[in-house]
Image (tube, grey):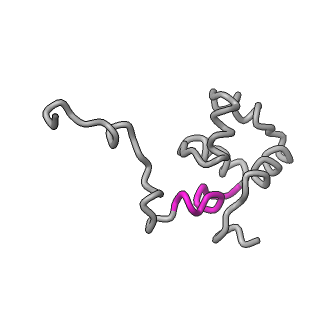
Amino acid sequence: MDVRTKGLNREDIKAGLRKLGFPLSLVAKELGVTRQAVTLVLSGTRSERIEKWIAEKLELSPKEVWPERYDTSSLWSKQLTLSDFTSKAEDL
């Protein structure tokens, strides 16, 4: 598999972390988040901080691990924030 174009699948990421001594529970503890938060990132939820930490441990860039999340030509690659979904009082 060419990691640069296809990325890693969830099980490859988990296995890579385990081989390095980081089961998901320890990843969560290191990051100060719940194990569920780490699992959600592996399932597709965006978290720049968790993605970056995982990629660094795997000695890859986040774009190499999740190229579809960092494809700048895709509308889905935009990191959304709460302000993207809320309107200002003056807009009402």
Magenta-drawn segment: 59-70
* Residue 70 location (% of width, % of height): 52, 60
Query: Is residue 66 found left or right of 88 in the rendered image?
Result: right
User: Which residue appears at 80% of the width and 38% of the height?
Assistant: 23
**Residue sitting nearer the eye, 62 or 8:** 8
Please say whether residue 90 is one of the residues in the magenta stretch. Answer: no
Residue 32 sits above or below residue 58 on the image? above
* Residue 22 location (% of width, % of height): 79, 39
The single residue placed furthest to the front in the displayed view is: 92
Residue 50 sits above or below residue 3 on the image? above
Q: Quadrant of the C terminus?
A: top left
**Residue sitting nearer the eye, 78 or 62:** 78
Q: Quadrant of the N terminus?
A: bottom right
Instruction: Give the quadrant of residue 46.
Output: top right
Label tally: 0
The single residue placed furthest to the left in the displayed view is: 90
User: Which residue appears at 67% of the width and 32% of the height?
Assistant: 36
